Amino acid sequence: MSLSFRAPLLFVAVLLFSLVSSTPLQAKPALLPRQQPQNSTLSVCSPLLNNLGSPTVLTPFEFEFRDAASSAWNLYNTLYTPTCIVHPRTVEDVSRVMKAIYDAGGVKYAVQAGGHSAMREWDTTDGGVLISFRNMANVSYDPVRDTINLQPGIRWGEAIGRLEPLGVAPLGGRLGDVGTGLLLGGGLSYLSARHGFSVDALVAADVVLVDGRVVTANATNEYSDLFRALKGGANRFGIVTRYEVKAIHVGTTEEKMMVGGSIVYDNSTTETLLRATANYVNNVDDPNSSILVIIGATLANNTVSPINIITFFYNGTLLPEGRANPYHEFMQITSLAVAIGSCSYAEANAVLGSGGDKGNGQIFGASAFGSAEYEISQGLAKDADESFEKYMNAYRAFNKFLDKAKGTPRPTPTGTPTPPIWPPPGFPIFPTFPAPKPPPVPTPPQYPGPFPTMPLPPIATSTIPGSTPTPFPPAPTWSQLTSVPPPTFPTTTSVPIPTTTPGPQTDAPNARRQETSSTRGPPTWSFPSSSTLMFPTPVPYPTPSTTPRPVPVQPISFIDDPEEDGISAALLAFTPVMKSQIEAGRRAGGNMMDPPLANFAFVQFHVTMPEWLGIVPKRVAEGRREVLNEMPPSNGLPLYMNECDAEQNVFETYGQYELLKRVYQKYDPTGLNVRFMKGPMGLGPSAKADHGRP
Ligand SMILES: Cc1cc2nc3c(=O)[nH]c(=O)nc-3n(C[C@H](O)[C@H](O)[C@H](O)COP(=O)(O)OP(=O)(O)OC[C@H]3O[C@@H](n4cnc5c(N)ncnc54)[C@H](O)[C@@H]3O)c2cc1C
């Protein structure tokens, strides 16, 4: 069949599809469009199909459509049915799509890169045009400019893995499956303290504007305002088709230029851990340091299994001694498991797993807590103790939420509750992390998994929340840990970069000679590697599965609480941001978040629903709101776009909100983006309008 016949056929076919979908006999309500395709959308999709052809443009009748429409990480974002899905191969393809949308006076559209947005419909669309970047997923290193070019469809794990043999990496996130959309929201990596938000490393970007024009924006050309607005402006300022970012010289896997890993604690440590976190935020200002603190819980059958985990990486081959060690306080807290050692940047980025598990509804919410010094200077707290109270408030609200959201026990065949498992299927953080086995008393938890030879401290005999734990013998000291002989890590295979021809030795600053593992001598163990950690081999990066997944059976909507439906997991995560990170951003020309020059912590509240539950129970939605009310951000601090809830007005918290609004007016004077694409509120005439809610 020639292409010219396809467009009218598409029109008829989609209409038929719509009719079928509205009959009561259809079996899978969740997967059918709730909003029927409008003629205007069809009038955009049909010529696109005609011009770009299949499979670049997919319609609901093509075999691959359902998989393409449901490739997002968040289950809720897999339940919408676009009218067509475009997988562009070039910037010209993207330009054509935007021009078609613009010429039609606007139709609903969405952009998807790595698909990890937790916000409903920010990376998919119900009845609109979805532009998905899976066919534009290259990465290359330019040794002359000492920069990395990323196409938007690449994921951080793959980009880092492919560049690893060259000893360079982009700043990205901390989990491999996440994609480049992270840059537009800021980006927090293990190297942020030195280099700023990941997007602060942006050198240039190719952007398709709302009317289809393609521009290259950098810090000094006529689009420098757009360039700056991209640093935090999310999906509002155009579609980025190429990111050129500074290459960070992180070394190869063999060179192991970092030290770090994870420590797992039971929940009797929570208050101490939160104090250590607050102290870190208050006192640490080491640009080599990074830490992520997680107060988490998994839930099953009315039972909550709490667990706390920190992951930290130090950008250096040795940790500073004694109190200069930024993690000193955390390492004094009695832990259940320690897995620390020398590692490379690529290995550090694989420690939390890929984060690629799909099939669960996910809900985010964000806050930001200032250091005691900041809070006192702003009159928000009178002393450090009062400033610390907000951590405890958040924790209390978190516990209240768990209680409310745990659901009622389902009867099991034996009549005994099924013990919860760690991690539950689809738990986004630490998907391969070892599990403490419930029940917590009186048997000490066992930790199977990748710590077989680790010198574990003895385990408490009681972990009942609120009970007095038996005093622990002291945890092993750092020097005890470091006396263990260096581990043998699995050898890493170098993966050639298909699209890059790294030049010979160049004059670029810090440019690294291309070497393979066979040309290099044995690695030097400058850090006495205590490691008992088996870092997952970061390359080659697995291709995302295309196996058809089960179909959820409930439509996405807020419904009355089904009593049994509890949540599957929840966490509070703290990422300290140091002055050095803020200064790095300012040195790079500034971003839209533009926080005050003070240490603070981004706080993320994250809820994972049971697999294939395509609803948000009212109880959970309300509980989420209560938690966010109980942990408001310290005045003057920005919220983090990538960890927020769609109902939070993140732009409004930005230091450069006024500038952001002006630049938006300039590049999208008709407001096409805020009228037709879901994304952060705050740039349109009203929060309701630009949030896309009815
Ligand atoms: C498991 C997990 C781990 C995470 N870890 C981190 C972390 O360590 N550090 C961190 O900073 N964040 C982290 N995040 C948050 C993450 O940065 C955001 O979810 C981010 O938006 C994901 O980008 P994406 O490309 O994967 O997602 P997508 O959903 O594809 O994109 C996110 C948003 O950006 C828009 N967008 C994407 N590409 C473009 C483009 N080319 N042009 C215009 N708009 C575009 C989309 O429309 C969407 O609104 C994590 C999230 C998850 C789920």
Image: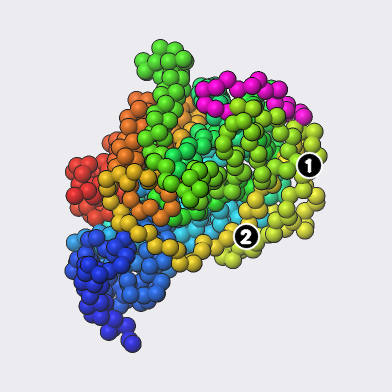
Q: Main secondary structure of the magenta part?
A: loop
Q: Residues within 10 Å of mark 1 (few under 14, many from 20)?
A: some
Colouring: rainbow
Q: Is residue 693 left or right of residue 66?
A: left
Amino acid type, residue under disc 2 in the picture: Pro
Q: Is residue 148 left or right of residue 451?
A: left
Q: Is residue 125 visible?
A: no
User: Would you place residue 282 above or below residue 416 in this image?
Assistant: above
- On the image, the x and y values in percent for residue 441 come to 59, 31
Amino acid type, residue under disc 1 in the picture: Pro
Disc assigned to residue 613: none
Disc assigned to residue 486: 1
- On the image, the x and y values in percent for residue 672 come to 23, 54
Residue under label 2: 540
| Label 1: element kind | loop
Q: Is residue 664 left or right of residue 69?
A: left
| Label 2: element kind | loop
Residue extending farthest to the bottom is 1
Q: Is residue 145 left or right of residue 406?
A: right
Do the numbered discs 1 and 2 sit on residues whose CB atoms are within 8 Å?
no
User: Would you place residue 656 above or below residue 58 in this image?
Assistant: above
- On the image, the x and y values in percent for residue 260 come to 65, 37
**Front-most of residues 213 and 174:** 174
Residue at 44% of width from left, 12% of height from top?
A: 383
Residue extending farthest to the front is 414
- Which corner quadrant holds the N terminus? bottom left
**Front-most of residues 73 and 437:** 437
User: Would you place residue 319 above or below residue 275 in this image?
Assistant: below
Magenta stretch: includes residue 479: yes
Q: Residues within 10 Å of mark 2 (few under 14, many from 20)?
A: some
Q: Is residue 540 visible?
A: yes
Which region is colored magenta?
Answer: 463-480
